[in-house]
Image (spheres, coloured by chain):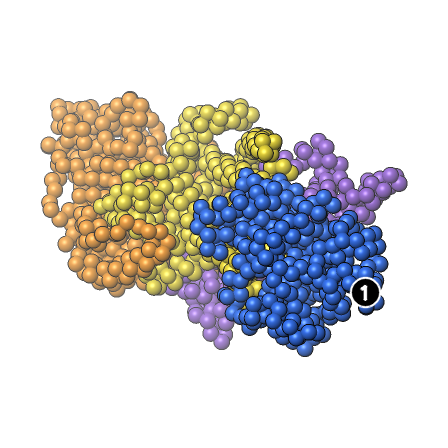
Amino acid sequence: MVSARDAAWLQLRDVRVRFGSSDAEPVVRVDELPLDEREFLGLAGESGAGKTTVGLTVLGLTRRAGAHVRGSIRLAGEELLSMPERRLRRLRGSTMTLIPQNPATAFNPVLPVGVTVLRTLRLHGCSRAEARGRAAAGLERVGLSAAHLDRHPHQLSGGQLQRVAIALASALRTRLLIADEPTSALDVTAQAQICTLLTQLRAEHGTAVLFISHDLALLAGLCDRIAVLHRGRVIEDRPATELVTAPHADRTRQLLAAAPRLRGLPVPGPRDRRGEEPGDENREARDDGYDEEAADGASGP
Amino acid sequence: MSSQILLGSRPTYRRRRRVVAIVAALAISLPAAGCSDGGARADSDDTFVYLSSRGLVTEWDPARSYSDEVVALSNTYETLTRYNAGSGKTEGVLATRWTSSKDRRTWTFTLRDNVRFHSGRPLTAQAVKASIDRTMRLKASASYVWDPVRSITPIGKRKVRFELSRPAQLDIIASATYAAWIYEVSDAKDYYKANARGTGPYMVTSWNPSSENEVQLTAFKDYWGGWRTNQYKNVVFQAVPQASTEAQLMRSGEGTYTGGMPPQLLDTLRGRPDLRVYERPSWQTLIGLMNTQKKPLDDIRVRQAVANALDYQELVKASRGALVASDGVIPKGMFGHTTTLDLPGDQDRARKLLKEAGYGPGSGRTITLEMTYPAGEDTVRTLGDLMKAQLRPFGIDLKVEGLAWASAQWPRAKKKNVNERQDIFVMWWWPDDPEPLSYFRNVFRTEKEISYNLAYYSNPELDRLIDSVGALTATDPDDAVRTYRTMQEIIIRDAPQLFLGTNTYQRVLAGDVKGFVDNPAYANVVFVHDLTHH
Amino acid sequence: MRARGARGGRTALVLALGGAGAIVLVALLAPVLAPYPEDATGAAETAQLLRPPSAAHWFGTDELGRDVFSRVLYGARIGPVVAVAVVTVSLVVGTVIGVVAGYFGGWIDELLMRLTDVFLAVPALLLALALATVLAPGPVGLTVALTVTWWPWYARLVRGETASVVGRPYIEACRALGLGHRRTLVRHVLPNASTPLLVQASTDVGGVLLVASGLSFLGLGPQPPTPDWGLMVEQSQNYFTTHWWLGTFPGAAIMLVAGVCFLLGDVVRDRFDPRHVPRPTQRA
Amino acid sequence: MKRARSGRGRPMIRYAARRSVLSALVAFGVVVLTYLIARVVPSDPAGVWAGPRASAVERARVRAELGLDRPVAEQIVSYLTGVSRGDWGLSVLTHRPVLTDLLTRLPNTLQLVLAGMVIGLAVGIPAGLFAARWHGGTVDRLVRSGALLSAAIPTFWLALLLQTLIASRLDLLPIAGSYDRAVMGAHPVTTVTGLPLLDAVLTGNGVAATDLLDHLLLPALVVASYPAAVLARMVRASILDAVGEPHIQMVRALGFPERVVLGRFALRLAWNPVLQLTALIFGYSLVNTFLVEAVFDYPGLGRYAADAVQSLDVPAVVGVTLLVALLYLAANLAVDLAQAALDPRVALR
């Protein structure tokens, strides 16, 4: 790889993530994965390839699940892996955050969504009034209104909830979004809307996005670059169009074959509904080595 | 309260307060507790705190009261006379002197001057007549003690004459624990409620049933006996169900008197300088009544065998001070008492009797006996377990059951079907007046409707003696003593009763109380006006 | 972490099963194990009153000179047996009522469930208290009183499980195939309800023991000289400050047995129903 | 938006109405049940009333006065109509209206139960939280075994142990009772709410409050033992259950410290089960106080019930049962409604 990449804004190097014991077979073996500001990086791969683990590792959330992480992840020159939890925590939300897979389960079901939104803004230094203002502005930008803050998750649609999540990221002026299959639970219209909003976000705040999906067609239409993950390794990392039109690796080809609908077309399209099956998520979570409670909970209420 | 007690209790009190202050500060923010221990305890000095194990007053009417409230009412009401168990004589209370005709059928009582009721009205001969008449008319409580009285006539304001239908010792009757109080009479509804209509040294200030400090009495200013500074001006009756709590309250100086305490707890109070333990035998006897109408105890030999099989010394020992051995039916200190009776307790004889009756070890027949006792009596329960162990070698299986007196033990004893009744009925007996007659008349006289003859015993010879001995006591005391002896011998011979023991009163009082006399004629009553402190 | 969880689970399993086994053994072998078996059945030894624990009397002697250790051992034949009996009978009664309510639904369900509501609205200890005063004091009366208060819990549990199973396609299929009610119930409905029942029952043995001991403590259980633990604690009440050993050991025995039952319930639950959020066992 | 709001209000009202009607039905059933039980008791209320040594004549008089000579069916009917009018009959033991007796005793018991529940919640919830936070660690193991023990410990035995150790041996707290007579005599409490401790605090009567608290602490600790245990277990399980949920992952990714993630977001999910449990525990504790009061001589409903049971005071036994059942039903109803308010999904079910 080119040495200029060393200066990338976010740089993963020799990252090994193991679950169970420190000498177990690593589930993630990423030798190198850079991401620049404003860049959209698609992270593709079949279920169990370790996509989500990479995303959570960047956020520093795999350690909590009992993972052993080695290597280096630098963000704007700062090493995240050796960073004390307290500082890392401050980066979460403000500098980087997660756009969840299934918005219906990503908000506390017994709290109005506004509670989470406002509390987050206040956590990152907003005053009460400031938080309200920013939240309202963010919501308007995504086509919602401040009134939606009083709603409980079950009173909002999946697309609306996902827009709330993006509005929050926008209000926080987050620089790095880990979007973990953010559209897999949504219908086509909502999917398109979300992708548009993410692009808008980049335009306004220079946000970089690590977009995790197994849908190469979707990634191809949205991302600058796509990295394909297989068994925890990056087997291909190239500009999006290049990768879609002329894949090098067999796995990439297989992935493309799995999404045959709109090969090469840079338009987000409909996709299969696999991601909606809880069992599937479970399997992935468990392969990633989460502890039992976490895995169990993932199936949602 | 003596300085000793204050000094003794203060440090612990302080310590307690500090801990609580910490806890309080943690738990809730209390307003600053600017309290002084001394101020809080100021009123205890002239308050006599009577601890009792259960709620006290269920009946305020002095003509109907027949239960625990007697300990309170005896301080608010007075009788014409009071029996002094020490001297064996009656002493004047509302009456100053009394005379009787030779045949003991006419009695004249002279009333004390300057006695006033709590209402302020003076005590008159007319009032005495009215109150005793009402008590007799209501036929409640122990009003039967007045049965010999045919008429009451006031003579002037100060004298009352009683005409009797048979000879009787009326000065003793007039000193009875229940139904002998002199009070103001009214038909008004709730006239006798949470108050006193008597002449006694104390008036009722508050009654909070089902609260801890149930009854509070305060001094009656115009009491004829007058007031000195070191007398108790207030009396509180505090219900404390747990004996261990009573012990603690006595130790901390919060209680002035407690009447009954298990031996192991009493031991922890002995020898303390701030407390004093008074012990004396009472007139309260623990008796086991054997069912003379139900197999197998209908067989006199089996009854005698059971009576002889028990080891009474061991029972007394197991009671650890709560009991002394009984000398017979009549307890020590009472008219007619004798120590020379031939009481059962011969185990060899028990074996022989059982063999004759066809029971006992080796006969292949076991006797199963059901014994009931009033629930809540720790000592009796212990004795029951011990009796069971003692009777086992004799081939007798004793089943011991503690039952609530009024709702289970007594009703069961009165069941129509004899076979549903118990075999042995254990209870305490004590007299309503200072005469031994009730130990026989109430318990062993033939009864048409069952009341207390729970041995279901009937002996015409004994009945005849019971009917005559009352009058005899009044006219020929020596003959009466002989008669009582014969009566006791009959009971021992026919064995309807087990002489389990006589209760020893064990009272604990604050060490500075002076003048306390435990009078068995008034079970558990403390005449607080008689006491002084400091 | 997973390894540790498993190891912790195994320790609990060993503790629970070992404890339960030990309790059963003690109950069975009490006459052999007790140094003074006659002390548990109504002997008295007035030469040995209230001796503190010693080599001869491990738990000391009581107010009648009886060996507390022997009595505590014999106590394993009373409280725990009552508890097991109560749970067993309640289980049977509750299951029948619950299955009937859940399977047939409609007004039968409504009627039976309102009936259980009435029973459940009166806390068990209180209802048992009222009942125990009616019934003759003793282990049998205690068992009856507690059973009357306990069955509604199982009835409700079984009804819920049954109702949830009844809606499933294979039961519909059973009905469509013309299988009899009884056969459908026994073959297909009951097995589904058995796991939560088993979990609840093992926990409840401990709960019932505690309530039964409470009633004994209030004097509504077995009568003296029965070496029932609750009764022994009650009898020791006025001795507690001066002769601690009288009440401490029987009380500890109750705690031990109840603890083992609860642990057993946890272990069974972890085995069969790992996602369970515990519901409190009814103790009052 | 309008649609959503009205949609939320209506099920709530319907839900509340339905729950209230059901509660009333159950309450009626409880009256019948308790009366039937009490009627089976072969007792002699007149004998209790007239005293242990009353004559047959006197007992007959009392029997007629109390209406006990009438047919049983007639007695039940008159009892039921009486209850609805607030006349719960006369206690044969105290000779006073049962309702008056009960209301005299209720504040102490309520105070005890509430104090116990407060301690139980204050200990149980944090304990469960800590156990979940350090799941699998030493804290967790301590909490779990502690909870197991305090659920398994017989209430009356714990009461005796604490009484002996803390009150009797160490003399740190009073051994029994609900107040010190001397203190109350010098600093009487003005009645505001009826709960003595609360009243003392409200009226700024520090001395009395301290004394009342002194007496309340040990019994309340005993009452708290079981609630604390169950709550700790429940909170721990609910939080562990929630930890794997995506929304917990989400708030972590938003930068909340673990303390807030568990203590605010995950615990919020446990509110409903905790509430439900609290109602159940309330009923349990109400009756559990019977045993606690028996040991600590605390003059509440429990001791009243024990006395009533002992002397087969039928109207009193029925009265206590009814009152406790009503309180329990009321608590359940309140919790059901609170639950529906906290989690709007409940009312829709």
Q: Position of residue D325 (x, y in %)?
A: 52, 38
Q: Colour of chain B?
A: orange
- Relative to B341, D156 lies left or right: right
Chain coloured purple in this rendering: C
Q: Give the chain of mark 1.
A: A
Quarter holding the N terminus of chain B is bottom left
The quadrant holding residue B314 is bottom left
Q: Residue furthest bottom?
A: A23
Residue at 21% x, 32% y is B198
Say few, some or many: other residues with alpha carbon within 10 Å of mark 1 (under 14 / 14 to 19 / 20 or more). Answer: some
* Residue at (18, 41) in percent of width and height: B91
Quarter location, residue C75: bottom right
Image coordinates for residue B137, horizontal then vertical, percent:
32, 25
Give the residue at x 64% y 65%: A35
Chain represented in blue: A
Residue named by callout 1: A247
Image position of A258 with respect to B117: above or below = below
Residue C127 shows up from this direction: no
Which residue is located at x 20 percent, y 58 percent? B6
Q: Can you say whether B72 is above or below C192 in the image? A: above
Position of residue D86 measured from the top left corner of the image (x, y, whole percent): 44, 27
| The furthest residue to the top | B187
Q: Is residue C116 left or right of residue B74?
A: right
Nearer to me, C256 or A139: A139
